Image: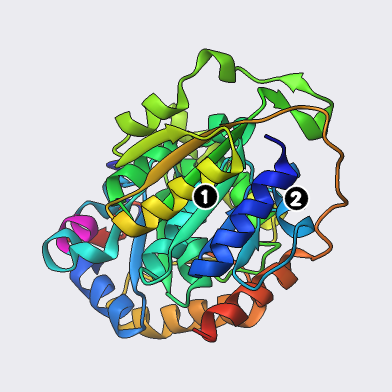
Amino acid sequence: MNRRDIFSAIRGVANEHGFVVVAGNGLQARFLYDVGDRPLNFYMLGSMGLAPSVSLGIAMGRPDLPVIVVEGDGNALMGMGSMAMVGSQRPARFVHIVLDNSVYETTGGQPTISPAVRFTEIATGSGYQRACEATTPEELVALIEQALEAAAGPVFIRVPLELGEGRPARVPYTPPEVTTNFTGAMSQG
Amino acid sequence: MSMQAVTSSVRARDLLDTLAALGQTHLVGVPDSEFKTLINTILEERASAYIPAVREDHAIAVAAGLYLTGKKPLVFMENSGLGTSCDALTSLAKVYRLPIPMLVAWAGYKGEDVPHHNVMGLGTEALLDAFQVPWFVMPTDVSELKPFLENVFDTAYRLQTPVAILVLPGGITK
């Protein structure tokens, strides 16, 4: 799968069901913006490894809103402790997606150690309700919808990712603009 | 840490009651011995407001998420956690303009603690200054507590910045 297909699929299901979508720094945030900005998106521009914890805070503050967090494997490795926090708090409708291409793409494609790690087992071991993989956009959407329907606790989805896709421009918002846009969306319901 | 740097102190009960009166909704962080009674009390009385974090930077990240949804979280940590939190402070809390107050136990105060606390103890003020995080030393007289905290929270919101409340060793007791 490539990011454009992944984020287009996520955007569709997110809009249909009112998901908050948080993207980790790197290409995830750029592609989330590039397929179409929406008020319930939150773009991490730095703070590598912290996207799932920010997402957990959002889910705990607004348990009425389902949350999707998407990060790359470098982010997931850096912030792996967050999975224990997500597992221990067990937000009911929380989907944690890791796009795994085994490289740090924005810094020039240096390898990560993700081939040595089984993210889905770590997720299960951290207390996630379900951990699985998706290899097509349709599969990804189905898994997200199942997680929403079940509302039974956090779900982890690993998505193997191709290399060599184009790179969109940086997210055009400053961090304070990201805050203002998101808190504005929160106060509207 | 077990050193005492103060002759009077605030009771954990008074601190918790004042925080609640001022609208704080959550306490999220990594325990320090300075916060033992504070945490044990909140676990007994308002456990749903307590969020244990695996690392202090993740505590700030969770607090960020809570703040973004309109909550008023307070982060707590030993000052060692400021080191762990540098990126969360500089690339999340500061630049996204998130008014997150942090209760920070001042281990290594004046460099008179166990060795592994002293470098951070002596560097705490400079570290916070370097990142333009306003810091305030918590009073040890309960009569000063509420106006102090009101001023700290007001500063955080007015300047749209995380702030640190430094707790001297022995500053909070049962």
Q: Observer-nearest residue: B108 or A80?
A: A80
| Residue A36 locus on image (x, y percent) | 74, 63
At which x and y percent is residue A18? 51, 70
Q: Residue at x 67, y 26 (%)?
A: A101
Task: Say whether residue B103 is left or right of residue A33.
Answer: left
Q: Which mark is residue B94?
A: none
The stretch of residues the image draws in magenta is B37-41
B80 left or right, relative to B47: right
- Give the image quarter of residue B134: bottom right
**Circle 2 residue:** A31
| Quadrant (top left, top right, bottom left, bottom right) of the N terminus of chain A | top right
Q: Is residue A24 visible?
A: yes
Looking at the image, which is closer to me, A118 or B29?
A118
Query: Nearest the camera: A117 or A165?
Result: A165
Amino acid type of the residue tagged 2 in the rendering: Phe
* Outermost residue, front side: A138
The colour scheme of the drawn protein is rainbow
Mark 1 is surrounded, within 10 Å at the Cα level, by few (under 14), some (14 to 19) or many (20 or more) other residues, namely some
Q: Secondary structure at mark 2?
A: helix
Residue at the top extreme, as displayed: A116
Instruction: Name which quarter of the figure residue B131 lies in.
Output: bottom right
In which chain is the residue bearing label 2? A
Query: Which numbered tag is attached to residue A141?
Result: 1
